[in-house]
Image (cartoon, rainbow, N blue to C red):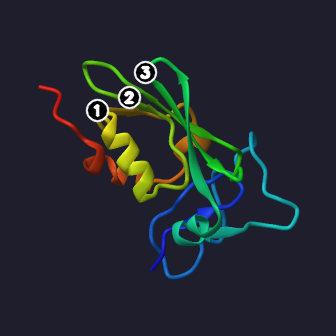
Amino acid sequence: MENFICVQCGTQFAATAEPPSRCPICEDERQFVRHTGQEWTTLERLANDHHNRFEEAASQLLGIGTEPEFAIGQRALLLQSPGGNLLWDCISLLDDETIAKVNARGGIRAMAISHPHFYSSMSCAAALPFFWRNSS
């Protein structure tokens, strides 16, 4: 059983023995399925030739994106605040380095997803306990 990731939009799906037959995100009228059809990868395969970059977008705002660009090129933003950090959107590649860098900045108190294409790696939500920091 593996968690397959849609190569087009970057959304990760529940563990299955075979890749899903379709991606409901890409079948939405605001997105598209490639002419060559649906294509899938896994977190392990993605990590073989991709990595995350970390960029200070502004004071207390860390941009996290994947290189080379993957799916629709989405990036996550970690907004640091005294009351706890907010992760705005997710990325498809969640690895040990990313977890360590986010934890070094205080973890994640809450997450916000701007629209369906940025669900990305559902393991972001599953990894929240690794990031969670009690702010009290």
- The amino acid type, in three-letter code, at marker 2 is Leu
- Across the whole image, how many numbered discs are drawn on residues? 3
Q: Quadrant of the C terminus?
A: top left
- The amino acid type, in three-letter code, at marker 3 is Gln
User: Circle 1 sits on which residue?
Assistant: 109
Q: Which mark is residue 51?
A: none
Residues under labels 1 and 2: Cα distance? Answer: 6 Å
For marks 3 and 2 on the same chain, the one whose residue lies earlier in the sequence: 3
For marks 1 and 3 on the same chain, the one whose residue lies earlier in the sequence: 3
Q: In the structure shown, which secondary structural element does the residue marked by tag 3 occupy?
A: loop
The residue lying at 62 percent from left, 49 percent from top is: 66
Image side of residue 17 versus residue 9, left or right: left
The residue lying at 75 percent from left, 43 percent from top is: 29
Picture layout, residue 125 above or below residue 59: below
- The amino acid type, in three-letter code, at marker 1 is Arg
Q: Where is residue 71 in the image (x, y as percent from the top left)?
A: 69, 52
Q: Place residue 133 in its image quadrant.
A: top left
Front in this rendered view, residue 56 or 80: 56
